[in-house]
Image (cartoon, rainbow, N blue to C red):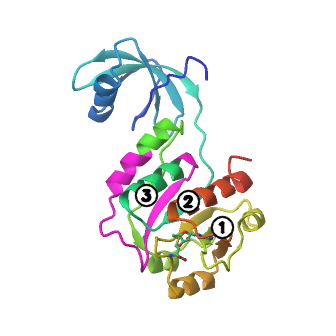
Amino acid sequence: MTEEIAKIRIFHSGDLIIGTELPLNEENSHYLSNVMRLQIGDNVSVFNGVDGEFLCRIKNSSKKQVIAEVLKQTQPFKDVPDIWLLFAPVKKDKTDFIIEKAVELGVKKILPIITARTIVEKVKIERYQAQAKEAAEQCRRLEIPDILPEQKLEKLLSNWPQERRLFFMDESLQGKNVAQVFAEEKGKPSAILVGPEGGFTTEEMQNLRQHPSVCSVSLGPRILRAETAVAAALSVWQAIDGDWK
Ligand code: SAM
């Protein structure tokens, strides 16, 4: 990484125009001045999810607001592959892990799914979004995945976009070999579905298997924790049909 790409990165929701001043919002200003203790003249990399990444320099800094100057573009925008993650929220720290790994593993969209055995009462979308922002800044993504409001599995299946393959991680060990399925379905818009700690009910599995856009997939002979299944399935997909190729 050349010295032009500053180590500290932040997501800024707004235009990034070379030669202009960039007033940062309160959250980013607090992070840069009070947490990272950046001074006037220090560099920071800024991305906005649309135009790529820019080298910026702190121009002035008060407790409430930091203003930077946009110096140059250091990376053009590049999107992630078209893979969605659908997951049934599990315990808080494990869900934090799922969000963080999904961002690092390049998902484009995250959809929390409520299934019969999902144990979480309140789905904290804002928490997920904060997790996703932090993970995207850390792993040098150029955008932050959309996190959609939670949906019930039945409703999701009834409105599922026909052209998108839905790879259902089937813990009943009846699924097809994951590498084989991903290779056979290469090049199509895709989504991976992982169930809750208690797994899918028999009825849910039947509904999934009958759905025309769904492929039932096995992740091998052992029963994985939901967070392990998310990381494993996304890793195999990225290696076969994503941007790890
Ligand atoms: N309670 C379930 C059981 O004992 O069979 C296990 C559920 S597992 C903790 C959570 C989710 O991870 C499952 O719903 C499934 O989507 C995925 N998963 C776990 N192991 C898997 C495997 N070997 N193959 C496919 N998916 C798996």
- Classify mark 2: residues with Cα within 10 Å, few (<14), some (14-19) or many (20+): some
Q: Is residue 108 magenta?
A: yes
Identify whether 167 is placed above or below 203.
Answer: above
Are the residues flagged by discs 1 and 2 in contact, CB closer than 8 Å? no
Label 1 – label 2 distance at C-alpha: 10 Å
Identify whether 157 is placed above or below 61.
Answer: below
**Residue named by callout 2:** 228
Q: Which residue type does callout 3 highlight?
A: Lys
Report the quarter where the N terminus lies. Answer: top right
Identify whether 124 is placed above or below 165.
Answer: above
x and y, in percent, of residue 43 in the image: 44, 18
- Classify mark 1: residues with Cα within 10 Å, few (<14), some (14-19) or many (20+): many
Residue at 61 percent across and 55 percent down: it is: 82
Q: Which residue type does callout 2 highlight?
A: Thr
Q: Is residue 221 magenta?
A: no
x and y, in percent, of residue 216 in the image: 65, 76
For ligand 1, tell me if the residue under mark 1 lies within 8 Å: yes
Are the residues flagged by discs 1 and 3 in contact, CB closer than 8 Å? no
- Looking at this rendering, what residue extends furthest in the top direction? 41
Residue at 34 percent across and 63 percent down: it is: 123
Magenta segment: 104-132
For ligand 1, tell me if the residue under mark 2 lies within 8 Å: yes
Q: Which residue type does callout 1 highlight?
A: Leu
Residue at 74 percent across and 61 percent down: it is: 186
Label 3 – label 2 distance at C-alpha: 10 Å
**Residue named by callout 1:** 219
**Residue named by callout 3:** 94
Label 1 – label 3 distance at C-alpha: 19 Å
